[in-house]
Image (cartoon, grey):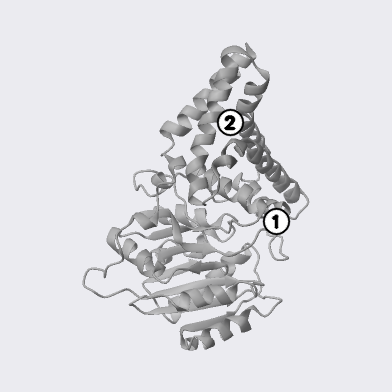
Amino acid sequence: MANAVLASIVLAIWLYLIAARGGFWRAAERDDRALPAAPPRGGAWPAVTAVIPARDEAECIGQTLASLLRQNYPGAFHVVLVDDQSRDCTAQIARDAAASLGAAARLTVLSGEALPAGWTGKLWAQQQGVAFCDQATAPDYLLLTDADIVYAPDALAMLVARAEANALVLTSLMAKLRCKSFAERMFVPAFIFFFQMLYPFDWASNPRRATAAAAGGCMLVKRKVLQSAGGMAAIRDALIDDCALAKLLKQHGPIAIALTERVHSIRAYPGIGDIRRMVSRTAYAQLRYSPLYLAGTVLGLAVTYLAPVALTLLATGVPQFVGLFAWILMALAFRPVLRFYRLTTLWAPLLPVIAAMYMAFTLDSAYQHARGRGGMWKGRAQANLSDAHD
């Protein structure tokens, strides 16, 4: 009887996810399916300033800046790097990269001030960059990007063209994450799969739905709309800062998020421990630091991903068949993301194992928070002491 009840729950979950969760599993929201970049109406391209918060990013910042300064963008484009009290030579590498391209005049490097109470490090650095733009460059758009993101030459023009054509207040691209090591191949596609399950891109891009999501590595924002929404101060203590910003700005206009081949993250996660730290940094914040939400999440993951395997291997009769059917649905749903990352679909049946490890990482996130080390990033523990925004 218990197996029959569990099988019914599992089947209902996967039929809902496949048929009624915004088609997230199809990974169909892509910027490469948009029209080529065309001049905005009137022919004048709006001014854009990129704001990059950077703390100890000597390894990546040179490539990131070079890709930005090589953009084939017809309008005015400037880059502001906020050196967030780096302990390495991040600022000097940035200046050298711009100088080598003959673009030193298009780069401003700000020395970040000490982190005040109530702010997370990234948002405080972005706040300083945005404040500088408000006073000095006053662009139409801000490109909020990370120090490990590399752009194809036409990426900015495509972003702006899409934003202008659809009057978007926030246009975000989910940077294609590095997927070379065994750990990256195992966990990165699943991370994208889970993110799209939580925030179906079709729903996030639909003005009639409340779902709001963005990917913090690449967010093109209308500057004046950000100002009217309260600026970065409105989300100053959010660890899941990208989705918090999306939620804030969707109250002021339409937003959009999509997968892309034009924007890549070059940050490496060579081992499973590196992935664990990346997930643990924000997982408990996503659950609003709630033990009740944590318990519900663990139970939900177990029923959704582990129960089909348990039913297949341990049950008999109809419950066993239902478990196998749900496992097959799960594997088929995972295939489009695997194809997007050009990985073998042999990973698809292993999604329950990967989900179990993500469950362990989430529990570790709660443990690190209890130790006072939540949100650890580049030597800073920035666990949110108030309710999360997302």
Q: Is residue 68 left or right of residue 72?
A: right
Please tell me in which quadrant of the rendered image residue 92 appears.
bottom right
169 and 331: which one is in front? 331
In the rendered image, residue 142, in percent from the top left (x then y), is placed at 43, 70
113 and 366: which one is in front? 366
In the rendered image, residue 276, in percent from the top left (x then y), is placed at 70, 51
Q: Is residue 110 visible?
A: yes
Please tell me in which quadrant of the rendered image residue 356 appears.
top right
Report the amino acid beneath label 1.
Asp
What residue is at 61 percent from the left and 71 percent from the top?
60
What residue is at 42 percent from the left and 54 percent from the top?
257
What residue is at 40 percent from the left and 53 percent from the top?
30
Report the amino acid beneath label 2.
Thr
Please tell me in which quadrant of the rendered image residue 346 appears.
top right
Label 2 neighbour load within 10 Å: few <14, some 14-19, many 20+: many
Q: CA distance from mark 1 to mark 2?
A: 26 Å
What residue is at 47 percent from the left and 86 percent from the top?
103
In the rendered image, residue 331, in percent from the top left (x then y), is placed at 54, 35
Asked if residue 326 is positioned above or below residue 388 in the image, the reply reads above
Q: Are marks 1 and 2 in contact (CB under 8 Å)?
A: no
Q: Quadrant of the N terminus?
A: top right
Q: Which mark is residue 274?
A: 1
Asked if residue 68 is positioned above or below residue 336 in the image, the reply reads below
In the rendered image, residue 246, in percent from the top left (x then y), is placed at 46, 55
N-terminal-most mark, 1 or 2: 1
Q: Is residue 90 left or right of residue 325?
A: right
Label 1 sits on a secondary structure element that is helix
Q: Is residue 223 visible?
A: no
Q: Which residue is mark 2?
A: 304
Q: Residue furthest right?
A: 371
Label 1 neighbour load within 10 Å: few <14, some 14-19, many 20+: some
